[in-house]
Image (cartoon, rainbow, N blue to C red):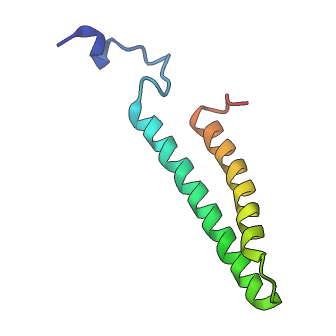
Amino acid sequence: MNSSHDDKNRSKDNSSFGDNPWRAMGLIGSVGGTIGVCLGLGYWIGGMTDGSEGSEYGSIVGMAVGFVVAVFMTILLIRAFTGGKAK
């Protein structure tokens, strides 16, 4: 076994996403799920307002609002995963 790939030789002080692929995959999954849920909820809420108001563009507006919320949620997720160091 090559000693450069041995986890025992790694410094715990310098842990980052490059050192822990599971943590990086967790971030990617969380971001994808957040974007999907925000867009889906925006579309659904916009569709509900379409039915009550009789308009035809509520779903699009709902998805746009969902996208804006998803961007802010993604920023918060990245800050949480990186320990608040993301700017």
Which residue shows up at 45% across the image and 36% down it?
Answer: 23
Residue 35, horizontal then vertical, whole percent: 60, 55
Q: Is residue 76 left or right of residue 13?
A: right
Instruction: Give the image location of residue 63, x and y in percent.
Output: 70, 65
Image height check: is 41 above or below 32?
below
Whether residue 75 is situated above or below residue 83 in the rendered picture: below
Identify which residue, 44 or 12, lies in the foreground: 44
Q: How many marks?
A: 0
Furthest toward the front, the residue is 56
Residue visible at 80% across and 89% down? 54
Residue at 62% in and 39% down: 78
Q: At 45% across and 24% down in the image, what residue appears?
A: 18
The quadrant holding residue 46 is bottom right
Above or below for 22 versus 35: above
Image quadrant holding the N terminus, namely top left
Residue 33 location, x and y as percent? 53, 56
Q: Quadrant of the C terminus?
A: top right
Where 10 falls versus 53 (above or below)?
A: above
Q: Nearer the viewer, residue 42 or 79?
A: 42
In the image, residue 4 lies at what x, y percent? 29, 10
Residue 2 is drawn in which quadrant? top left
Kindly give the residue lying farthest to the left in the view shown. Answer: 1
